[in-house]
Image: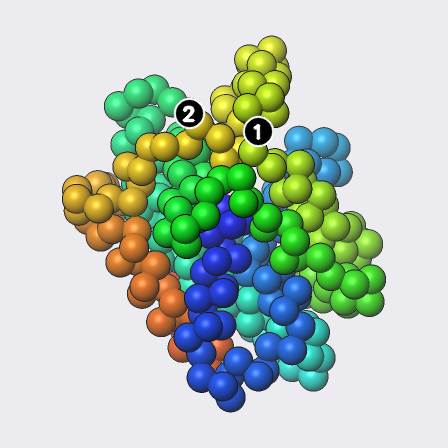
C-alpha cells in the first residue's frame, strides 16, 4: 500500500497535473483508478483470509521481479486502450509505494518497538491514518469515504485484466493462476472497500472479532474510524532507521515524499526502462 483512498487521490493528482497530451492517453478512468491500487487488488481476493485468496501473490509482486512484470504489463497493454489506462494507474501505484514505503515501514517498526503493537497492524493503521489525512487535506471527512466508486470496471475490461495477470504470473513467476480468479479480485476490491465504509458499529464489531480470533488489529485497522494519530506523516522530520538497512535513516515527511512520487509517476508514464524499477514496491532492493 499506502491504502486505497490515498492511491486514488494520488492518481487524481497525477492526472490533474499532467499535460494534455499525456492525460489524453488515459481513456478509461475506472481502469486507471483500479490500476492505481497496483498489486493491492489481490489483497482483497477472498477477503485475504479465506481459502483460495490471491493475497500471497500480491505480496510476491510487492517484493520480487518488479522490473520484469512491469515490463510484461507494458508490452501486453501496448495496443489496448483499456489495459493501457490500467497500466498507467499501476505505474502511479509503484511510484507512491516505492517512494513512501520506506518511511511507513520505518514508522511501523518504531511503533512496534515502542508499544508492542504487531508491526503489520501498525503498518495498516498508519496507512489508514494517511487516508484520513488525505481526505482532510481535500476538505472532506471520513464519512465522505467513497474510494469504491472509482474502481468499478465493465465485464470486458475485467476479463482482459484477468488474462493479462494470468499471463504475467505464468511468464514471469512460472505460476499457473486462472484468469477468472485474477479478474474476480477486481470485483472483490470494490466489494470489500465498500464494506469498509467507516462506522463505529463496524469498527467495534471488527475489534471484537479480532479479539475472539486472537489476531492483530489488521481488520479494524483498515476502517477509517478512530484514526487520529498522524505520527506517520513525520512532519517534524524525525529520523527513523530504515527497516531493510538499520545503518541508514529516513527523515523526510510524507508530504515531501508524496510530491516526489507525483513527479516520478509522470516521468514513468512518459518514458521508462527496466532500470527505473531497480527497487521493489517497498522501496527496497530485491534479489534477482
Relative image position of residue 157 (x, y in whole percent): 76, 67
Q: In this view, does 57 lie to the left or right of 287?
A: right
In this rendering, the answer to whether 198 lies above or below 182 is above
Relative image position of residue 124 (x, y in whole percent): 46, 36
Q: How many labels does the image show?
A: 2
Residue placed at 56% from the left, 19% from the top? 204
Q: Residue at the front extreme?
A: 139
Q: Is residue 113 left or right of residue 222?
A: left
Q: Name the residue that disc number 1 marks.
A: 199
The residue carrying pointer 2 sits among few (fewer than 14), some (14 to 19) or many (20 or more) residues within 10 Å by Cα, namely some
The image quarter in which residue 29 lies: bottom right
Could you tell me which secondary element the residue under label 1 belongs to? loop
* Viewer-nearest residue: 240 or 75: 240
The residue carrying pointer 1 sits among few (fewer than 14), some (14 to 19) or many (20 or more) residues within 10 Å by Cα, namely some
Q: Is residue 76 visible?
A: no
In this rendering, the answer to whether 187 lies above or below 113 is below
Q: Can residue 140 be seen in this view?
A: yes
Q: Residue 118 carries which label?
A: 2
* Viewer-nearest residue: 3 or 224: 224
Q: Sequence order check: which comes first, mark 2 or mark 1? A: 2
Q: Which mark is residue 162?
A: none
Label 2 – label 1 distance at C-alpha: 24 Å
Relative image position of residue 45 (x, y in whole percent): 69, 43
Relative image position of residue 98 (x, y in whole percent): 40, 57
Q: Is residue 236 left or right of residue 266?
A: left
Amino acid at each position: 500500500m499506502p491504502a486505497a483512498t490515498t492511491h486514488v487521490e494520488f492518481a487524481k493528482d497525477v492526472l490533474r497535473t499532467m499535460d494534455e497530451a499525456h492525460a489524453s492517453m488515459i481513456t478509461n478512468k475506472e481502469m486507471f483508478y483500479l490500476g492505481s491500487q497496483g498489486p493491492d487488488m489481490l489483497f482483497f481476493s477472498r477477503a485475504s483470509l479465506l481459502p483460495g485468496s490471491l493475497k500471497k501473490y500480491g505480496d510476491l509482486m510487492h517484493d520480487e521481479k518488479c522490473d520484469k512484470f512491469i515490463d510484461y504489463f507494458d508490452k501486453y497493454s501496448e495496443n489496448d486502450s483499456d489495459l493501457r489506462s490500467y497500466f498507467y494507474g499501476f505505474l502511479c501505484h509503484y511510484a507512491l509505494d516505492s517512494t513512501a514505503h520506506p518511511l511507513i515501514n520505518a514508522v511501523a517498526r518504531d511503533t512496534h518497538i515502542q508499544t508492542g503493537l504487531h508491526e503489520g497492524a501498525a503498518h495498516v493503521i498508519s496507512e489508514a491514518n494517511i487516508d484520513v489525512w488525505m481526505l482532510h487535506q481535500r476538505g472532506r471527512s471520513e464519512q465522505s469515504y467513497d474510494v469504491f466508486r472509482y474502481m468499478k470496471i465493465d465485464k470486458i475490461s475485467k476479463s482482459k485484466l484477468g488474462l493479462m495477470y494470468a499471463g504475467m504470473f505464468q511468464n514471469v513467476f512460472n505460476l499457473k493462476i486462472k484468469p477468472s480468479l485474477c479478474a474476480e479480485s477486481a470485483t472483490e476490491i470494490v466489494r470489500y472497500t465498500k464494506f469498509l465504509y467507516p462506522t463505529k458499529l463496524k469498527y467495534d464489531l471488527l475489534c471484537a472479532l479480532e479479539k475472539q480470533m486472537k489476531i492483530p488489529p489488521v481488520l479494524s485497522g483498515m476502517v477509517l474510524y478512530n484514526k487520529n494519530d498522524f505520527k506517520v506523516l513525520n512532519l517534524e522530520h524525525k529520523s527513523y532507521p530504515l527497516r531493510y538497512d538499520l545503518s541508514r535513516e529516513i527523515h523526510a515527511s510524507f508530504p515531501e515524499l508524496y510530491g516526489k512520487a507525483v513527479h516520478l509517476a509522470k516521468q514513468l508514464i512518459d518514458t521508462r526502462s527496466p532500470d527505473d524499477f531497480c527497487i521493489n514496491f517497498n522501496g527496497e532492493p530485491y534479489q534477482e
